[in-house]
Each structure stands twice: as C-alpha cells, then as structure tokens.
Image: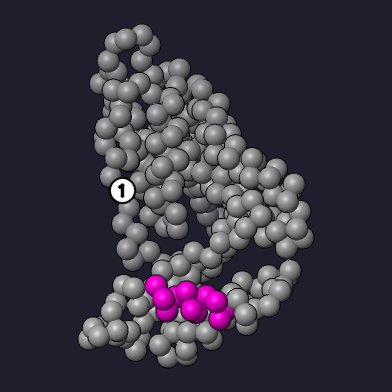
Amino acid sequence: MQTSETIAIEPKSTMTDPLAVAQTILAGFNRHYSLFRYSAQRAKSLFEAGDWLGMQTLSRERIEYYDRRVRDCLRTMAPVIQTHVQSGPNAPSQRQQIFWQAVRQSFVSLLAEHHQPECAETFFNSVICRALHRDYFQNNFLFVRPAVATDYLDSNQPAYRVYYPAQTGLRQSLTRILADFGMACGFDDLPRDVQRLARAGVREFNQRVSRDSSRRLAHDCQVHVLGNLFFRHQMAYVVGRV
C-alpha cells in the first residue's frame, strides 16, 4: 500500500513583504558588523608590525564601511521604496504607514536572538531616515527608544575581562591586563610601565578618596577591561572601568 505525503511549499518572500525588507536591513547590518570585526583584527596585526601607513588606510576604510552598507541596503530596497514611499509634499498614506510599521515590527522580531540589537536598531534608523520622509521620524517607524532589552543578554564570548586588584595586588593585576592582550610586538619594559601605571592609579585614587576617610577598596573590587584594544593612529588604548 502506497501512501502519499503533501509537502507545503512556502512562497518566496519578496520586497513587497515587510519581513523581507526587515531581513534585508538586518543582513546589511550583519555584513557591516562582520567587516568591522575583521578590520579590528587587521588593526592589531598592522599595529604589531608598525605599519602606520596601513593603519591610516584602514582607518579611512572603517569610516566608509557604515555608509557603504547603508547605500547597499537602499539599492536593494529601491523597488519597495518606489512603491511604498510618498511622492511630493503630501503626507504618507495610511497604507504606507501600515507597511513601514510592519517593517519595524518584523525587525524587532528578528532581534530576539541577536547579540547586537542596539547597534542593529541604529543601522535600521540610518536606512529608514535616508529612505523615508521626516514624517516617519517617530517611534512607530524608527527606534527612538530601544525595543530589545540587553540587560540580561547572553553572549558566546564575554565583552570584557574581570580582574581583582584587592585580592591579587595592583601591580600583578595591571601586568595581567596588559599581557592578556597577547601583543606580538611585546613591551620595551613591562615591569617599569606597570610600576608607573600603579603609581598613577594610586595617586588618582588618593585624590578621590582622602587617606583619613573610612572608605576603602572592597575585597571584591573589580576592574572590567574590554577584550579588544582600541587603535588610533600609532596608539593602542586599553578601555576599562573600576
């Protein structure tokens, strides 16, 4: 006895579908973010090699990345913009407003498992602001307020490392902070530089908290340091907080 199965084939989404427009914008952001991450890796290699001309070129390219990805999205969205954007000084029709509200709602649904929702929302705003009239510049169509809470967002890789200077000692903590970046170019004199940093840190702390004050560093005092260096010109910056 033979049995037949019916396979449902979903229709391919087109640019007349709000979800397809939202997916196009998110794909543009994802491409921008991946290129941005790759350029950060290149910056570390160029810095380690002392290739300052290459660093300047990369810096210019990184500035252009964002606008280029926005323009790419607008070109892909050209058919839907022609159909769903009002022409002339007239206010957008109700049909157009409903469509772009649906695009925003679809974009929010796509960010449920995304690890960079706030940056993606900013990219969405950049695309929409260039495509639509200023009548759309409100929270129904743009992200005036963040739509996705990031307070408890899990990440596969932590954005920062944690150090405990009150437990391990200030100099040892500073040494680990600098050494953990794994710079191939090395340091001229790491112990000397750590000693200078420690003195500057203690001096800054004493200016903020007087010696006769009852306030002291807690045993679990933490130093949070971003996992990547920030490169600019011939300098590499460590970004963190106490």
Answer with left or right where residue 231 lies relative to residue 74. right
- The residue that mark 1 highlights is 146
The chosen color scheme is one colour
Residue depicted at x 67% and y 60%: 44
Answer with left or right where residue 91 lies relative to residue 231. left
Location of residue 42 with respect to 18 vertically, above or below: below
Q: Nearer the viewer, residue 106 or 216?
A: 216
Answer with left or right where residue 77 lies relative to residue 184. left
Quadrant where the C terminus lies?
A: bottom left
Q: Amino acid at mark 1?
A: Pro
Q: Nearer the viewer, residue 63 or 6?
A: 63
Type of secondary structure dominating the magenta stretch: helix
Residue depicted at x 58% and y 40%: 63
Quadrant where the N terminus lies?
A: bottom right
Q: Nearer the viewer, residue 155 or 229?
A: 229
Q: Magenta residues?
A: 194-204
Q: Quadrant of residue 82?
A: top left
Residue 12 in view of the camera:
no
Residue depicted at x 60% and y 37%: 64
Location of residue 34 with respect to 72 vertically, above or below: below
Q: Secondary structure at mark 1?
A: loop
Q: Position of residue 41 (x, y in %)?
A: 66, 58
Q: Position of residue 142 (x, y in %)?
A: 33, 36
Q: Quadrant of residue 19?
A: top left
Q: Quadrant of residue 224?
A: bottom left
Residue 58 in view of the camera:
yes
Mark 1, other Cα within 10 Å: few <14 / some 14–19 / many ≥20: some
Q: Position of residue 96 (x, y in %)?
A: 32, 22
Location of residue 92 with respect to 120 vertically, above or below: above
Q: Position of residue 134 (x, y in %)?
A: 32, 23
Q: Nearer the viewer, residue 222 or 160?
A: 222
Location of residue 85 with respect to 66 vertically, above or below: above
